[in-house]
Image (tube, rainbow, N blue to C red):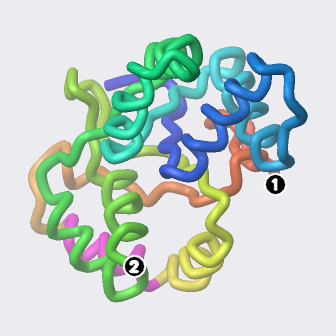
């Protein structure tokens, strides 16, 4: 399994990164969210943070990749990221998370717990990067209950699934490599 800090980007964070890269290429002024997303993008390679994207974001990027305006930005972005795929128990965990979150947010959070790569060399994420403040607030508020539900579920799982952990759900500017979390 990979030793790099893994960070799952939700669709909006992915979009802000790509828009920021496009804005830089076009020489336009960037929004605050684009700047914050690009800061994470730049820090990721320097600080050993592996960026992963959700499948729906990849689908949109693959469509944009063929358009001349986006091709010079999308392809390098896709080369620097990986797509997270549902692993075993993803659906079960997503159903449980829907008690607290929308279907889409539950899917992102379930991927962050029971997600893997095409090479199956990772399981779960350390972080979810999102600008969705309601999701962050709900995660923070319900994290104890969610952790208890995951603990109960893990008791019946076989390795390596019995060792999954909950990710931290943070804004992009708050993401730090493992071992460098602020106290």
Q: Residue at x 54, y 32 (%)?
A: 5
Q: Which mark is residue 14?
A: none
Q: Quadrant of the C terminus?
A: bottom right
Q: Is residue 153 magenta?
A: yes
Relative vertical location of residue 76 with respect to residue 149 in this rendering, above or below:
above
Q: Residue at x 78, y 46 (%)?
A: 173
Q: Is residue 68 magenta?
A: no
Crowding around mark 2 (Cα neighbors within 10 Å: few <14, some 14 to 19, many 20+) is: few
3 lies left or right of 152: right
Q: Quadrant of the N terminus?
A: top left
> How far across and down, in percent of the image, does residue 139 sit?
54, 75
Residue 80 visible? The answer is no
What kind of element bears circle 2?
Answer: loop
Residue 74 visible? The answer is yes
Q: Which residues are magenta?
A: 145-154
Residue indicated by mark 1: 183
Q: Residue at x 54, y 48 (%)?
A: 127
Which quarter of the picture shows residue 62?
top left
Residue indicated by mark 2: 102
71 lies left or right of 181: left
Frontmost residue, 149 versus 82: 82
């Amino acid at each position: 399994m990979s030793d790099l800090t893994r960070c799952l980007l939700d669709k909006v964070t992915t979009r802000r990164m790509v828009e920021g890269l496009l804005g830089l290429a076009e020489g336009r002024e960037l929004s605050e969210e684009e700047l914050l997303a690009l800061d994470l993008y730049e820090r990721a390679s320097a600080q050993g943070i592996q960026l992963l994207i959700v499948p729906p974001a990849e689908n949109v990027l693959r469509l944009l990749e063929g358009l001349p305006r986006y091709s010079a930005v999308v392809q390098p972005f896709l080369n620097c990221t990986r797509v997270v795929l549902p692993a075993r128990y993803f659906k079960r965990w997503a159903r449980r998370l829907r008690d607290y979150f929308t279907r889409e947010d539950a899917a992102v959070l379930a991927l962050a717990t029971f997600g893997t790569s095409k090479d199956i060399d990772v399981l779960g994420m350390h972080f979810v990067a999102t600008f969705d403040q309601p999701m962050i607030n709900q995660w923070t508020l319900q994290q104890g209950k969610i952790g208890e539900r995951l603990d109960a579920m893990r008791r019946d799982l076989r390795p390596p699934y019995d060792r999954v952990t909950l990710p931290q759900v943070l804004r992009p500017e708050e993401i730090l490599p493992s071992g460098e979390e602020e106290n």
